[in-house]
């Protein structure tokens, strides 16, 4: 069955960096785009960005553009979110989710990993 | 930046019809998608491309679009449908945007 497992979250000081990972299984990883979506505590969903199936294209939300970088390693079935110059407002649960072209949307989500930016 | 506007809350009695709206200037040109999120769980897709239902989603869920507003309708809402619902679409640069979410209460 399809599984997405995020890891790498934790407490980090403002201005520091953190890298999140998402390990996928149960599907042909190198044929699917992957998205990152975050959710601040008690708040709504916010789109972070996407990486295409082959890594050829990446797009980011305005609030993270220039600070966050998405990459993937298709040999390891993993996608990464490198977060630099973190701010308090980046505190959130970070989900990775699979893009399904037939639905043109996200059909499987992980359970998320929590990032807390605090001094 | 582009915004999708949803009512913060909708409340219905069991068996009634719940309608959740989502408004955005680009809606006439872009599809809308709907996700359901229950407490402590990841979101689940319940509607795509305005009015298409994914496999496994009950028939009581339907979607429609008119002008700048899209609507998720739950006909005969059940207690298990109580959740937060988020619409999602794209802005003019093809970046994804989520609405602020609507809490559906069924009681």
Image (cartoon, coloured by chain):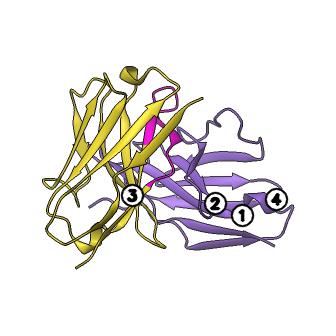
Chain colours: A yellow, B purple
Instruction: Kindly check if marks 2 and 1 are in contact, taking CB atoms under 8 A apart as contact.
Output: yes
Nearest the eye: A47 or A26: A26
Residue lying at 45% horizontally and 61% vertically, measured from the top left = B99
Quadrant of the rendered structure where residue A34 is?
A: top left
The magenta-colored residue range is A97-112
Q: Which residue is outermost to the bottom?
A: A119
Q: Which residue is mark 3?
A: A38
Check residue A41 for magenta coloring. no
Q: Which residue is mark 2?
A: B38
- The CA distance from mark 4 to mark 1 is 7 Å
Q: Secondary structure at mark 3?
A: strand
Q: Earlier in the sequence, mark 2 or mark 1?
A: 2
Instruction: Kindly check if marks 2 and 4 are in contact, taking CB atoms under 8 A apart as contact.
Output: no
Q: Which residue is mark 1?
A: B82
- The CA distance from mark 2 to mark 4 is 14 Å
Chain identifier of the residue bearing label 1 in the image: B
- The CA distance from mark 2 to mark 3 is 16 Å
Instruction: Kindly check if marks 4 and 1 are in contact, taking CB atoms under 8 A apart as contact.
Output: no
Q: Which quadrant holds the C terminus of chain B?
A: bottom right
Q: Position of residue A110 (x, y in %)?
A: 49, 45
Q: Position of residue B45 (x, y in %)?
A: 58, 44
Q: Position of residue B74 (x, y in %)?
A: 73, 54
Residue lying at 60% horizontally and 43% vertically, measured from the top left = B47
Query: Do the dots labelled 1 and 3 sit on one chain?
Result: no
Up/down of A57 relative to A87, above or below: above
Nearest the eye: A116 or A56: A116
Q: Position of residue B101 (x, y in %)?
A: 52, 65
| 2 vs 1, front mark | 2
């Amino acid at each position: 069955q399809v599984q997405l497992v995020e890891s790498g979250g934790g407490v980090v000081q403002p201005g520091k960096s953190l890298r999140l990972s998402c390990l996928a299984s149960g599907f042909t990883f190198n044929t699917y785009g992957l998205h990152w979506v975050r959710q601040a505590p008690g708040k709504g969903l916010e789109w972070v960005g996407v990486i295409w199936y082959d890594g050829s294209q990446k797009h980011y939300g305005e609030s993270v553009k220039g600070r966050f970088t998405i990459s993937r390693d298709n040999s390891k079935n993993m996608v990464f979110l490198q977060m630099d110059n973190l701010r308090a407002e980046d505190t959130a649960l970070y989900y990775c989710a699979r893009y399904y072209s037939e639905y043109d949307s996200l059909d499987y989500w992980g359970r998320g990993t929590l990032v807390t930016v605090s001094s | 930046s582009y915004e999708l506007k949803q009512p913060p809350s909708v409340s219905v009695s069991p068996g009634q019809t719940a309608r959740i709206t989502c408004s955005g200037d680009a809606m006439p040109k872009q599809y809308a998608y709907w996700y359901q999120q229950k407490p402590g769980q990841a979101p689940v897709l319940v509607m795509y491309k305005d009015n298409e239902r994914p496999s496994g989603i009950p028939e009581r869920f339907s979607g429609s679009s008119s002008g700048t507003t899209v609507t998720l309708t739950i006909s005969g809402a059940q207690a298990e449908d109580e959740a937060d619902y988020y619409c999602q679409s794209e802005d003019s640069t093809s970046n994804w945007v989520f609405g602020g979410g609507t809490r559906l209460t069924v009681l």
